[in-house]
Image: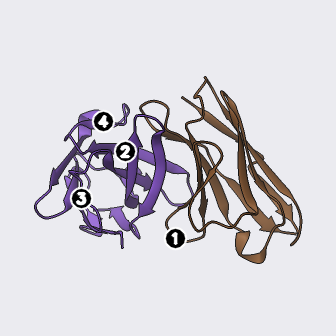
Chain colours: A brown, B purple
């Protein structure tokens, strides 16, 4: 199952609302996760089963969608949120990741 | 406290076999639903899932690498291993191990704990 994220990169300011989309090549129910990765670090799980916030993740992060179309939203971008974000499908093997969305400072 | 740590050679020569070890603590791989995966990331590239082993010792592999990969475990030592044969320059990457949990009601719940990664360079 191929995952296509858009955009590939974006520039935003602190306080902005940011939306990243992930489209699956076939239906994956709600078996989608989102990760944040900062340079040189391991990915960090933000959301699983499309909309469940991982423990300890700030509530400004939210996820939605099911089937083939999913969204990660950051309601008010903070300085520590500048990173690359990946979606991942866990509906069927092989597990696959999107190509990533880099969020940069405007 | 859950931790995972990858270890293995930093440099391997082309055609050699790579063996990586994931040493973990804070959970048991024999607990129902528990799984450990290997994932890699080439420099500047996206994440690529490689293999998974679960609480019943069932295994799954990336189809594109299946013939070269073997995942195994030593539950007494809390370790998971990955071997990759016939290494080439395209296999230069940071290799991560990560934990996930599977439930009948919710499926796989994402990779919630990751190791810090092990950079492997393939060079003669």
Disc 3: CA contacts within 10 A as few (<14), some (14-19) or many (>=20): some
Find disc 2 in the rendering and name its residue.
B50
On what subunit does the disc labeled 2 rest?
B
Please give the name of the residue rendered at 21% of the width and 55% of the height, measured from the top-left corner: B81
The reply to whether discs 4 and 1 touch (Cβ–Cβ < 8 Å) is no
**Same subunit, tags 4 and 3:** yes
Q: Position of residue B50 (x, y in %)?
A: 37, 44
Please give the name of the residue rendered at 25% of the width and 51% of the height, measured from the top-left corner: B31
Q: Which mark is residue B60?
A: 4
Q: Which mark is residue B37?
A: none
Number of numbered discs: 4
Q: Position of residue B10 (x, y in %)?
A: 29, 70
Mark 4 → mark 1, Cα distance in angstroms: 26 Å
Identify the element where label 4 is drawn. strand
Q: Which mark is residue A41?
A: 1
Would residue A6 appear left or right of B50 to someone viewing this image? right
Earlier in the chain: of badge 4 and badge 3, it is 3
Find disc 3 in the rendering and name its residue.
B28
Mark 1 → mark 2, Cα distance in angstroms: 19 Å
């Amino acid at each position: 199952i191929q995952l296509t994220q858009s955009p590939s990169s974006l520039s935003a300011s602190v306080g902005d609302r940011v939306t990243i989309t992930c489209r699956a090549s076939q239906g994956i129910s709600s078996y989608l996760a989102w990760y944040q990765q900062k340079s040189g670090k391991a990915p960090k799980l933000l959301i699983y089963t499309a909309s469940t916030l991982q423990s300890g993740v700030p509530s400004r992060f939210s996820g939605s969608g099911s089937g083939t179309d999913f969204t990660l939203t950051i309601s008010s971008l903070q300085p520590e949120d500048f990173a690359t974000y990946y979606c991942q499908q866990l509906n069927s093997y092989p597990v696959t990741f999107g190509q990533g969305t880099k969020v940069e400072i405007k | 406290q859950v931790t995972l740590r990858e270890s293995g050679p930093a440099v391997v020569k082309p055609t050699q076999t790579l063996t990586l070890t994931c040493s973990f603590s804070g959970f048991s791989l024999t607990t129902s639903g528990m799984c450990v995966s290997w994932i890699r990331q080439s420099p500047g590239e996206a994440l690529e899932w490689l293999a998974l082993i679960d609480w019943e010792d069932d295994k799954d592999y990336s189809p594109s690498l299946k013939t070269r990969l073997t995942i195994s475990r030593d539950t007494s030592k809390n370790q998971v291993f990955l071997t990759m044969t016939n290494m080439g320059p395209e296999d230069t990457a940071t290799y991560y191990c990560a934990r996930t949990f599977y439930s009948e009601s919710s499926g796989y719940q994402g990779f919630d704990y990751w190791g810090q990664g092990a950079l492997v360079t393939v060079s003669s």
